[in-house]
Every structure is written in C-alpha cells, then in structure tokens.
C-alpha cells in the first residue's frame, strides 16, 4: 500500500508554475492512498497528469481549482472520506478551471470510479468549458443525510457539450459508453443497509462496504467504510486486548493490529507511534512517548508530562543571574530543572538598570510542576507578602550536582516566611543546607534533616530563625495528625508521615470504611478507594476488602466470574470469536449457547437474539445470505 500525506495549501500556489507542477508530481506519483487532502491548483494546460491515476482513496478533501488542463485523470479514485473539508463544507471542490483570456480549461472529470463521499458536500462551479458534471447523480455518491445546501453543481457548462452515450441513461462523466456513471445506492432494494451490486434484496453489499461491491461478502467491497483488514472490511481492527472467557479478563492479543488511516496494520510505519490502538505521528499533549518491546508508544503521564528545562546558569539561561520577569515563562510545565534556581532581589523586585520589571508573585506558581532540581536552590529574595514556599509543593529532589559555596539549599533573611512547605521534599542528594536569619520561620526544627541526605558528609547550618519555644507558644506546631517525624508547616498535608492514616498527601484520622461518598479499604496505613464497580454498602458492612473489581463485597451492576462489571460481555472480542453472555436473575453473567452469534437471553440456543441486519460481521457465513 503506497500512502502519501497530502497538503493543506488551499488556493495558495508557488509563483513558479513549473515548480508548482513538479511539487504536485513529487507528492502524488505512485501514491494510492492520500492521508490528507489532495489539492490540484494552478496547473497549466499542457502538463502530463497521468500519474494521478494511482490515487484510489483520499481521507481529507479533493480540491481542483485555477487549473487549465482539459482532463482530470483521477480515474481510480473510489472514495473521498472527508475527514477534513474545504471551507468546512466540501469534500470535493472544483472551480475556476479555465483561462480567462484563452481557450484552455477543464472539460471532463475523469472520476469514473468515484462512488463514495463519506462526509461533506460537492461544489462544482465556474468551469467555463466543463461538460457532463451536471448529468451526475451526486446523491448516489454523497452519504446520507443528503445535505441539500452542501452540494452545488452549476449547469454553467460550455454551450457546446455533447450528450451522454445512450447506454448511460443520461448520467455520465464523458461521452463514450465507458464513461457511464455506475449507481450503487439509489438503485438498491430498500432492505439494503448501504450499497448494492444489483437491484435485488440478495444484491446488498456487506454493511462494512463503501462505494459499492462485487458481491455480498466483506471481502467483496470496492472500499471500506471503516477499516481494511488484509482485504476484508471490518468495523474495528483486531483489538490489543481480548476477553479470555476462562479468566474473565481482558488479555493481550498476539494477533492485534493497529489502525493506520482506514487500514489495519501489524506494525505502525516508520516515524509513527502507537497511541492506544492507532498509529499517530506524535503523542497527544497528555501523553509521553516510551519504547516498550521495541515499539514506540504513547503512555498517559501521571499529572503532567516530564519536561526538562534549563536552570539559571545553564544552556539558554547561561548568562542569567536570577529568575526574573524576563525568563520566568521558560519554566512553564517544567518537571525537571537541569541546573539551579536562584531568586535574588534583582529578579523578585526588578532591576531598573537592566529594565527588568518586578515579578508578578502569581507567576511563581509555574514552579508547582517542578519535581527535581539537579543543581541547587538559592532563595535570597521572595515576594514580601508570600509566607511560604508552597510553589515548590511538588519538589521531591534537590540533586546538588552543582553547589553554591558547598550549598545545595540556601534560604537567607526572608522575614516574611513563616513555614517552608516543601511538602514533597524527600532527598537532598549532595551539598550542605544553610537556613539562617529568617526571623519568623517556624516548623524547621521539627524535621530531622539528616534523613533527607544521601551522603554522610553533608552538613546543616540552621540558625537565627524563630525560636522553637516562641513558635510553640503561638501555636505554630505540627498538626495533631502528623507523626513525631515533624512537618513542613501547619495543616495535615505538611506532615513528613502520619500518626494514623493517609489519603494521598493528607493525614487523616480514619479511612472511609463505612461511610463517605467514596468508600475505601485500609492498606497498611493508607486509605485506598474501592473499585467503582463495587456496590456502596450500608449498615456497618465493608464495601470492598482490596483493590480492583474482584474485591467487592457486592457488585453494583453485574458479576462476571470474580469481577464486578458494568454489563455482561456483549460481543467482546475474544481470541477466536466474539463473546456474548446473559445475566441471570442474580445478575451473574453466563455464556450464551455457542450458536448465538449476536447475544442471548438465556443459556440455550432458543434464547439467541438476532438483529435483522444482513451481513452483520458477527454472523456466521451460512446466515449471511
Ligand atoms: C474502477 O473500478 C473497477 C472495479 O470496479 C476496476 O476494475 C477498474 O480498474 C477501476 N479503474 C478504472 C479506470 O475503471
Ligand atoms: C445547511 O442547512 C442547515 C439546516 O437547513 C443549516 O443548519 C446549516 O447551517 C446550513 N449549512 C450551510 C453551510 O449553509
Ligand atoms: C453561472 O454563470 C454566470 C455567468 O457567467 C455566473 O454569474 C454564475 O455565478 C454562474 N454560476 C451559477 C451557479 O449559476
Ligand atoms: C485493502 O488493502 C489492500 C492492500 O493492503 C488492497 O489491495 C485492497 O484493494 C484493499 N481493499 C479495499 C476494499 O479497499
Ligand atoms: C503546558 O501544559 C499544558 C497541559 O499539558 C498545555 O496545554 C500547555 O500548552 C503547556 N504550555 C506550554 C507553554 O508548554
Ligand atoms: C501579594 O501582593 C501582590 C501585589 O503586591 C498581589 O497581587 C498578590 O495577590 C499578593 N499575594 C498574596 C498571597 O497575598
Ligand atoms: C535523624 O536521622 C538520622 C538518620 O536517620 C538518625 O541517625 C538520627 O538519630 C536522627 N536524629 C534525631 C535527632 O532523631
Ligand atoms: C520569644 O519569646 C520571648 C518571651 O516568651 C520573648 O522575650 C522573645 O523576644 C521572643 N523571641 C523572639 C525571637 O520572638
């Protein structure tokens, strides 16, 4: 399968028409599937366009405008999917294809095989010499519901147009009997759910077909409505996970395929990554690219995706002295600072000599995403009305790979600070600590700083802050839910560890075992939420006794094997077949009889459910006709 990317230039073109033609040829020569838009604009009358014959599918729109050639040789184009539309409306737009001061212009559309436009309308106007386009039955090509205001095909053809060949019953793309329009929808029996290859009920195409077919099977389609899986049209590609009826669980499927445009592929093409089960060019912003077993995949980031940034004195901030209003935006979304963070008075309050404005204190919140500083943290200035460093609430590690006079953490003369609030800080890997002359700082003395160190020769200098007894006298003490390990500030979220239980970062008295909106179980001293499929219990009963849907006391909906589930398996893909189950009066799921291919209400073959769709993909072969 030869795939090319297409373009999105609209009507803009290169000023050099030779270049314009060469670019077109380079894009589409030997291309069968255009994953994007096919735009043919500003091509002169004498150009050879026969290379366009290779194109069979276009996923976006087709634009043909401002050209002077006589014939459009897209003879093998079968389907335009219209996933992108020209002017948000048109899947096919053909206009202004003639030369104002001459006799050249588009006369014939060679779109003989075009039988399907899945989304969007058609616009054909101001083609002075164009013939036959107004004979085409566009309703047969464009999908329902018929968008009447979305299709404009002017009858403004040249006055000298011939007629269709008499075998074409008035509808054709050109003059001969080879140019008749093939109708594949408006001629079908009412029972057909889509297209057909003849007028009878028995001539319906498979419902996964697009554009028509040569027979009733999913392998007889001209094009696929959804996905082409090695020649068969399918609703979805073989899934990454399949249901194992003996373990009642989804398991990895070794026959899985990924969707690549409208195709199922075993491997994504070079330069593509797997996002859930699709091949994509780049991961969405909430995911990061990782390689697993040689496959590049997108994985959801916890909270925020990792992003490493230069610190003060490194890379792009090599010559900076301090975080200031001119560079603070460089720290947006950073999780790791390669280098140091330094806050000096010239940054916080501004530096008139260098025309640097004071920092808006709100902006310091950019540091909330930072988890690691590889160098040192040096705070010698801070906005006067901010009483803590809670903007570093996610800071886990200070690396100390670069030191400032032997220091990796320096907090000096901050009279407004009452607590540090480094609530996530777990490690200071190297370097000494210097916290002095912060006359209002409390809580610092409750912490055993040595536990943060990685090496034995790290030193602590903490002096001339607020006296411990004065803090205690004013109630500046750790929350009663904190353990004796101390705290970074007031409140149950600033404890180094909890006296009783924890939920996330917060210390609590007890878990929500028997009440509360979300019920929990106790895992050592951590409160963990029960699975959402567990029924919320009352009257002193536990809702669950462990994680996952197999640890519920009672299911909130149905039970499949040991697991509580939203509904019984209803056409879940299994390794070799689709799995259907029914629920008994106790709301437990049981397998349908093997003969039931669309579901059931009970255990026997008499309980099978049938849907009146011809050629449903899960119907066995003999039931298809
Ligand atoms: C059009 O489709 C038919 C199959 O329906 C195929 O045989 C033919 O080669 C295609 N191309 C042209 C130019 O007719
Ligand atoms: C087409 O008509 C529908 C309803 O008649 C209207 O909502 C829609 O905006 C129209 N679209 C255009 C492109 O005019
Ligand atoms: C047809 O041609 C006339 C005159 O050239 C023009 O004004 C008009 O916009 C054209 N299109 C349609 C749809 O009539
Ligand atoms: C499906 O893809 C194969 C190539 O992988 C191609 O030969 C075949 O024509 C396609 N079938 C349909 C119905 O698009
Ligand atoms: C920061 O991350 C958010 C969410 O992921 C994203 O929307 C935003 O564009 C990012 N901003 C910058 C400057 O990277
Ligand atoms: C600190 O003061 C600035 C203005 O000087 C104000 O915008 C900001 O909201 C204040 N912050 C706090 C935490 O009070
Ligand atoms: C602090 O922690 C270190 C290492 O965990 C330990 O050796 C030391 O005794 C502790 N100091 C105090 C005062 O608890
Ligand atoms: C601490 O409190 C004592 C009295 O309780 C007071 O004399 C002293 O000035 C206070 N010191 C500081 C640094 O606030």
Image (cartoon, rainbow, N blue to C red):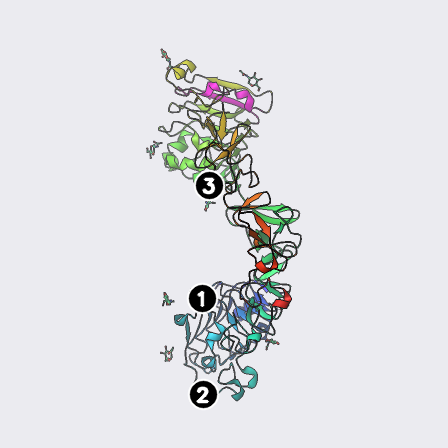
Q: How far apart in space, not on screen, are marks 2 and 3 (Cα)?
A: 66 Å
Rendering coords of residue 607 (x, y %): 57, 58
> Is 128 inside the magenta-drawn segment?
no
For marks 1 and 3, the one nearer the N-term is 1
Report the residue marked by disc 1.
86
SS at mark 3 in the image: helix
> Is 433 inside the magenta-drawn segment?
yes
Residue located 57% across and 64% down the image: 616
Looking at this view, is 154 or 511 the one in front? 511
* Image quadrant assignment for residue 356: top left
Closer mark to the observer between disc 2 and disc 3: 2
Rendering coords of residue 338 (x, y %): 54, 36
Rendering coords of residue 531 (x, y %): 52, 40
Looking at this view, is 108 or 148 the one in front? 148
Stretch in magenta: 429-453
Report the residue marked by disc 2.
160
């Amino acid at each position: 399968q030869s795939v090319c990317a297409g373009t999105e230039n609209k009507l803009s073109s290169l000023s050099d028409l030779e270049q314009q033609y060469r670019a077109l040829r380079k894009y589409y020569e030997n291309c069968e599937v255009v994953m994007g838009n096919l735009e043919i604009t500003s091509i002169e009358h004498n150009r050879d366009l026969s290379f366009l014959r290779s194109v069979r599918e276009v996923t976006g729109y087709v634009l043909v405008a401002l050209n002077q050639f006589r014939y459009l040789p897209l003879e093998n184009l079968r389907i335009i999917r219209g996933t992108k539309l020209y002017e948000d409306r048109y899947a096919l737009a053909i206009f202004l294809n003639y030369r104002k001061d001459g006799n050249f212009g588009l006369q014939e559309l060679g779109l003989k095989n075009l039988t399907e436009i899945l989304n969007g309308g058609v616009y054909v106007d101001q083609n002075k010499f164009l013939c036959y386009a107004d004979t085409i039955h566009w309703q047969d090509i464009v999908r329902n519901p018929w968008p009447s205001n979305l299709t404009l095909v002017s009858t403004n053809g040249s006055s000298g147009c011939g007629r269709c060949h008499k075998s074409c019953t008035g509808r054709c793309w050109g003059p001969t009997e080879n140019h008749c329009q093939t109708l594949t929808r408006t001629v079908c029996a009412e029972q057909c759910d889509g297209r057909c290859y003849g007028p009878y009920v028995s001539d319906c195409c498979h419902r996964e077909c697009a554009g028509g077919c040569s027979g009733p099977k999913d392998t007889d389609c001209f094009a696929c409505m959804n996905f082409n899986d090695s020649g068969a049209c399918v609703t979805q590609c073989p899934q990454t996970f399949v249901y194992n009826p003996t373990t009642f669980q989804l398991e990895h499927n070794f026959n899985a395929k990924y969707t690549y445009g409208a195709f199922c592929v075993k491997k994504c093409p070079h330069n593509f990554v797997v996002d859930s089960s699709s091949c994509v060019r780049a991961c969405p912003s909430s995911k990061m690219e990782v390689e697993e077993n040689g496959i590049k995949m997108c994985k959801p980031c916890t909270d925020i995706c990792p992003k490493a940034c230069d610190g003060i004195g490194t890379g792009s901030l090599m010559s900076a002295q301090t975080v200031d209003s001119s560079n603070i935006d460089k720290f947006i979304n950073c999780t790791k600072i390669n280098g140091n963070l330094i806050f000096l008075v010239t940054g916080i309050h501004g530096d008139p000599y260098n025309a640097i404005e004071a920092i808006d204190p709100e902006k310091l919140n950019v540091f909330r995403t930072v988890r690691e500083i590889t160098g040192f943290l040096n705070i010698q200035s801070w906005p006067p009305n901010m009483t803590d460093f809670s903007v570093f609430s996610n800071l886990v590690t200070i690396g100390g790979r670069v030191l400032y006079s032997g220091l990796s953490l320096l907090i000096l003369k901050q009279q407004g600070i009452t607590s540090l609030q480094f609530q996530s800080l777990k490690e200071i890997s190297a370097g000494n600590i210097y916290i002095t002359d912060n006359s209002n700082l409390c809580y610092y003395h409750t912490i055993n700083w040595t536990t943060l160190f990685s090496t034995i020769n790290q030193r602590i200098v903490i002096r001339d802050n607020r006296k411990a007894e004065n803090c205690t006298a004013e109630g500046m003490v750790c929350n009663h839910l904190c353990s004796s390990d101390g705290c970074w500030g007031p409140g149950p979220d600033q404890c180094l560890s909890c006296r009783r239980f924890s939920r996330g970062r917060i210390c609590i008295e007890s878990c929500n075992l028997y009440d509360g909106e979300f019920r929990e179980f106790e895992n050592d001293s951590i409160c963990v939420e029960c699975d959402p499929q567990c029924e919320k219990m009352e009257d002193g009963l536990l809702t669950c006794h462990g994680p996952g849907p197999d640890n519920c006391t009672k299911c909130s909906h149905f039970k499949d094997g040991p697991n509580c589930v939203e509904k019984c398996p209803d056409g879940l893909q299994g390794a070799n077949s689709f799995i259907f189950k029914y629920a008994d009066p106790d709301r437990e799921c049981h397998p349908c009889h093997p003969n039931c291919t669309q579901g059931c209400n009970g255990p026997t073959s008499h309980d099978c459910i049938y849907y009146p769709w011809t050629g449903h993909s899960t119907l066995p072969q003999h039931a298809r006709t």
